[in-house]
Image: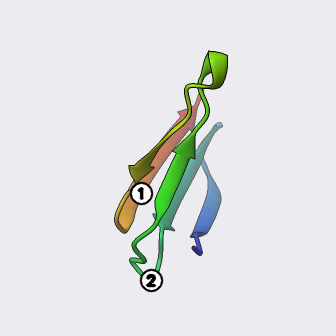
Amino acid sequence: MIDVGARYKTKLGKNTLTVSSSVENLFNKNYWQVQRGQYDRSFAVVGMPRTYWLKAELDF
């Protein structure tokens, strides 16, 4: 599974704006994700499909 992301920072007056984006599971592969619990209670769940996100942060 491949994830990619990018980040851009710029100044807005005295403030800093940061914009981030990412694509998780870029090629939309099917997979199982193992969850390990306590007392040997492990189980597997179907992994997430391709997921996009975008985030903006303003520091002031």
Closer to the camera, 27 or 6?
Answer: 27
Q: Specify the quadrant that holds the C terminus.
A: top right
Q: Earlier in the sequence, mark 2 or mark 1?
A: 2
Quick check: 28 above or below 50? Answer: below
The three-letter code of the residue at mark 1 reads: Gly
Q: Residue 9 location, x and y as percent? A: 65, 56
Circle 2 residue: 27
Residue 38: x percent and y percent?
63, 17
* Mark 1 surroundings: few (<14), some (14-19) or many (≥20) residues within 10 A: some
| Depicted 60 relative to depicted 44: above or below | above
Q: Quadrant location of residue 53?
A: bottom left
Query: To which residue does mark 1 refer?
Result: 47
Circle 2 residues within 10 Å: few <14, some 14–19, many ≥20: few
Marker disc for residue 28: none
Task: In the displayed orientation, state which residue is furthest to the bottom.
Answer: 27
Q: In x, y percent, where is residue 17?
A: 56, 47
Which quarter of the figure is the N terminus placed in?
bottom right
The residue at 39%/77% (across/down) is 28
Give SS at disc 1: loop
In front here: 49 or 8?
A: 49
Circle 2: residue type: Phe
**Which of the 4 quarters of the picture holds residue 41?**
top right
Q: Are marks 2 and 1 in contact (CB under 8 Å)?
A: no
Vertical side of 58 occupied by 34: above or below: below
